[in-house]
Amino acid sequence: MSVTKKFTKGSKHELGSEKCRVTFKLSKELASAHQAVGARLAGTFNDWGKEDPDKYVMNVLKNGSFSITITLPANNEYLYKYVIQNANGEVWVVDDDKTVETRVTDFENSYISTYLDKE
C-alpha cells in the first residue's frame, strides 16, 4: 500500500487555504487476500465514512489494486482505514506502512500528516 502527497497553495486572499492532494493506494495483494469486490476510504476527515461515503469509493485499477485521490486541508493530521467490500460484507484494514495505535481506544489506525515537514 502506498500514500503520495502533493501540496498546493491557496488563494492569496485566503489565509490558511493550502491544500494537500493525497493519493491512497490499496495493494492488489491485500485486495485479493480479502476477496475485494470494492473498497472505500474512511477516516477522521469524513467522520469514518459517515459523511458522504460515496465520495470516498476507491477506483479499481487494471492490476487489481484500488486507488483514490482526495484533497485535504494542509497542516493537519488524520487517521484512516481502507474499507474492503467482499461477499461477506466489509473488512476494515489498516495501511501496514502507516499504522499507529490510537491512544484512546487501543485500535490500530493508519496515520497521515498533511504538514509540509512531516511524513
Image (spheres, rainbow, N blue to C red):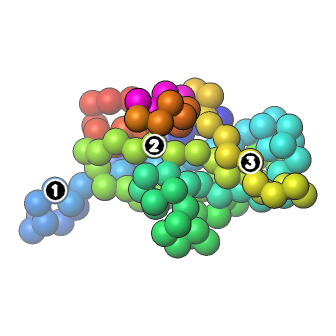
User: What's the distance in space between the residues labelled 2 and 1, CA to CA?
Assistant: 21 Å
Q: Describe the element under mark 3 as helix, strand or loop.
A: strand
| Residue 98 visible in the snapshot | no
Which badge, 2 or 1, comes first in the chain's sequence? 1
Q: Nearer the viewer, residue 42 or 2?
A: 42
Kind of residue at badge 3: Val
Judged left or right of residue 2, residue 5 is left
| Residue 85 visible in the snapshot | yes
Which badge, 3 or 2, comes first in the chain's sequence? 2
Q: Position of residue 66 (x, y in %)?
A: 71, 51
Q: Position of residue 29 (x, y in %)?
A: 81, 35
Q: Which residue is mark 1?
A: 16
Q: Are marks 2 and 1 in contact (CB under 8 Å)?
A: no
Rendered position, 53 above or below 30 = below
Kind of residue at badge 2: Leu
Magenta-drawn segment: 99-103
Q: Main secondary structure of the magenta part?
A: strand
Image depth: mark 3 or mark 1 in front: 3
User: What's the distance in space between the residues labelled 3 and 2, CA to CA?
Assistant: 17 Å
Residue 91, numbered circle: 3
Q: Residue at x 37, y 38 (%)?
A: 113
Q: Is residue 36 magenta?
A: no
Q: Residue at x 25, y 45 (%)?
A: 75
Q: Which residue is mark 2?
A: 79
